[in-house]
Amino acid sequence: MKNQPVLLLSLVAALLTGGCSVMGGSSEAPVLYAPVTRIQPDPAWPRVTWRLALAPATAPALIEDERIMVSPTPGELQLYRGARWANAPTGMVEDAVLQTLEASEKIASVGRQGNGMMADYRLLLEVRSFRSDYAGTATPSALVEVNAKLLDVAAQRIVADRSFRQQQAAAGTSVGQVSEAFAQALGSLGHDIAGWALTMGDARAAKTKP
């Protein structure tokens, strides 16, 4: 019963009050899932000399919650009983992108906004979907959608804007198998966003070079 989804009843109220449970009222401690992202840097990415800061990723309240959402049918959201993410979806997306950029060794300096680093560009991430989605199939897929914007700090101007989508089929219906699908989706997403940021920033720097 632990891995069965329950209807998403009064979720907004639960998020606001923090005192209600949509997990069936069980006192059993939830199982925490922490997808291990496969970092996928690409040797073909451009090597850049500028510095990049990742702003704190944003998401709607329903997505930012650490309970694991599932969509059994289009337009319907439920929650897996007795299961939670160990980290919020925004944190997982941030980590995937930052770790990929660091592992690439293609950038002079990269870090989170607020760590004291002077940045030439800032990467803004908005998580728009982060759920297990059946989409009419017998087994779900991990669905992650993120909008990314690259900000030129000196000009205070958005110089690139793109939405990214990763959908990775799970091997089965258990939460553990869904978590593994998210690990794969996050790895691919980190690769796509990191490569895009390096390429777009490199093109922008070439245009503005004295």
Image (spheres, rainbow, N blue to C red):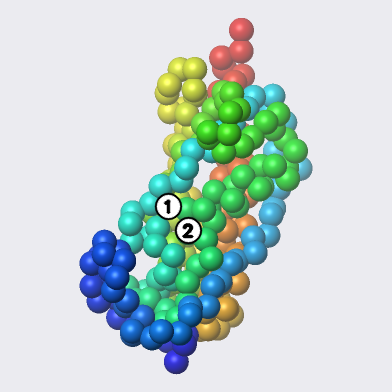
**Number of other residues with Cα within 10 Å of mark 1, as a class: few under 14, some 14 to 19, many 20 or more:** many
Q: Is residue 28 above or below residue 69?
A: below
Number of other residues with Cα within 10 Å of mark 2, as a class: few under 14, some 14 to 19, many 20 or more = many
Query: Is label 2 in a helix, a strand or a loop?
Result: helix
Quadrant that contains the C terminus: top right
Q: Residue at x 57, y 62 (%)?
A: 185
Asked whether residue 200 is in view, the answer is no
Residue 110 sits in quarter: top right
In the image, 73: left or right of 160?
left
Residue linked to disc 2: 89
Residue 189 lies, in percent from the top left, at 56, 53
The picture places residue 21, in percent across and down from the top left corner, at 32, 76
96 over 142 or under it: above or below: above
Q: In the image as oriented, which residue stretches furthest toward the top?
A: 210
Name which residue lies at 47% across and 53% down: 90
Residue 113 in percent (x, y) is at 53, 35
Q: Would you name the residue on which mark 1 appears?
A: 127
In terms of secondary structure, where does tag 1 sit? strand
Q: Residue at x 48, y 80 (%)?
A: 29
The amino acid sitting under disc 1 is Val
**Quadrant where the image shows the N terminus:** bottom left
* Alpha carbon distance from label 2 to label 1: 8 Å
Kindly identify the amino acid type of the residue bearing the numbered disc 2: Pro
Mark 1 and mark 2 in contact (Cβ < 8 Å)? yes
> Of residues 21 and 179, which is closer to you in this image?
21
Q: Position of residue 186 (x, y in %)?
A: 57, 58
Query: As rendered, which of 143 and 61 lies closer to the eye?
Result: 61
In the figure, is residue 10 to the left or right of 176?
left
